Image (cartoon, grey):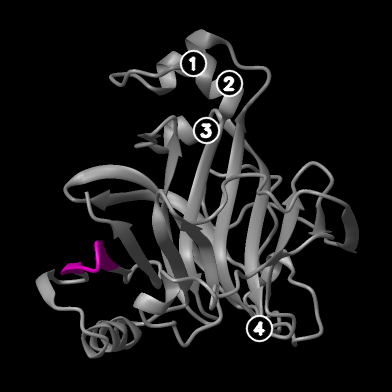
Amino acid sequence: MTTYKKYKKTTAAGIACFMMLLAAAGCGNEAQSSNEPQVDEDVPVSSSNDGITIKQLPYTVKTSIVGGDKEMMLSVTNNTEFSLTDFQLHYTVKPDLTDEQITEAFSGTEVKIKKLRKNGLTCEVEGFLQKGKKATGECKYEGNTFTDDKQLDVMDPEMITVEYLNTDTSALHTVYYEFASQEMVDDASTSSFDVWPSGSSRASQIPQPTSTYLTNLMDDDLFGLSFSVIGATSADYQQYINDCVDMGWQVESSMGSSTDFAAKDDYTLTVYFYSSSSVLNVSLDPQS
């Protein structure tokens, strides 16, 4: 998610093992390593008291056509009892490969071998993924996308990182699946949601969102007030626009999922809705 933490997120302290998984070959993609877990489509979903298992998150990585171009795409289905906020699959270069072999796999495409060896490849599905739903995301390194199965053949899967919303604790939790140890481990720390700054003069100028799932909240004299709401819907977006109008804000322009309001009390207001990730972004900026 553009608004979420990337690989090895900031919830990084005190990882404790809580479940050992058996792994077999493949996860539905010929280009994937044989170390990847076998997905059992009949495995039951977790209850609210269970931890997430890798079998509850069947995924594939394969070549797709996106906008007329070939790209490697990650597809994942959420069979857990929770809503996911981020799913990442990280690869590293196979250690026994030479630079020449990597170059051959990327024939006809410029490849930054040193950066690929150092940083690897990350496939990511960003945004709010409700239980029972399926979503896709891109596979990238250094901003470049993989385009062919041969390119993925030079990589080994290293780790899956899953961030999910636990409504019982009203917090974001992170779990990791490590391919080397074939273990699912739980990050002992959690990421709490931000609290609406009700005492702020800026917060009093705009509607308080009805959702408590606030992230990336910033309230600053120099930069203004901004925040994100995860798990938002198009109806939430429209309702927030209406609430802004009710507070005296006048719509200056609106295009699809973005609305700009005319300046008011030395501030400008912009509201965005990202339907692909179910995120509502609000920015109240000092008028320049």
Using the rendered view, name the quadrant where residue 155 is placed. top right
The mark nearer the N terminus, 1 or 4, is 4
- 205 or 245: nearer the viewer: 205
Residue 264 sits inside the magenta stretch: yes
Q: Name the residue type under label 1.
A: Ile
Whole-angstrom CA distance, mark 3 to mark 4, is 33 Å
In the picture of the structure, the residue carrying the numbered disc 4 is: 81
Q: Residues within 10 Å of mark 2 (few under 14, many from 20)?
A: some
State yes or no: discs 1 and 2 in contact (Cβ < 8 Å): yes
Give residue 100's mark.
Answer: none
- The residue under the point 40% across, 19% down is 111
Indicate the position of residue 152 as horizontal and vertical percent values.
49, 35
The stretch of residues the image draws in magenta is: 259-271
Q: Does 17 sit left or right of 246 as displayed?
A: right
The mark nearer the N terminus, 2 or 4, is 4
Give residue 153's mark.
Answer: 3
Indicate the position of residue 71 as horizontal and vertical percent values.
32, 43
**Which secondary structure is most common in the magenta stretch?**
strand
Q: Name the residue type under label 4.
A: Glu
Give the answer, above or below, for where 77 lies relative to 97: below
- The residue under the point 45% across, 67% down is 228
Q: Secondary structure at mark 1?
A: helix
Indicate the position of residue 90 as horizontal and vertical percent values.
60, 42
Indicate the position of residue 11 as horizontal and vertical percent values.
72, 53
State yes or no: discs 2 and 4 in contact (Cβ < 8 Å): no
The mark nearer the N terminus, 2 or 3, is 2
Q: Residues within 10 Å of mark 3 (few under 14, many from 20)?
A: some
Whole-angstrom CA distance, mark 2 to mark 3, is 14 Å
In the picture of the structure, the residue carrying the numbered disc 2 is: 117
Q: Does 186 sit left or right of 58 as displayed?
A: right
For marks 3 and 4, give the one nearer the viewer: 4
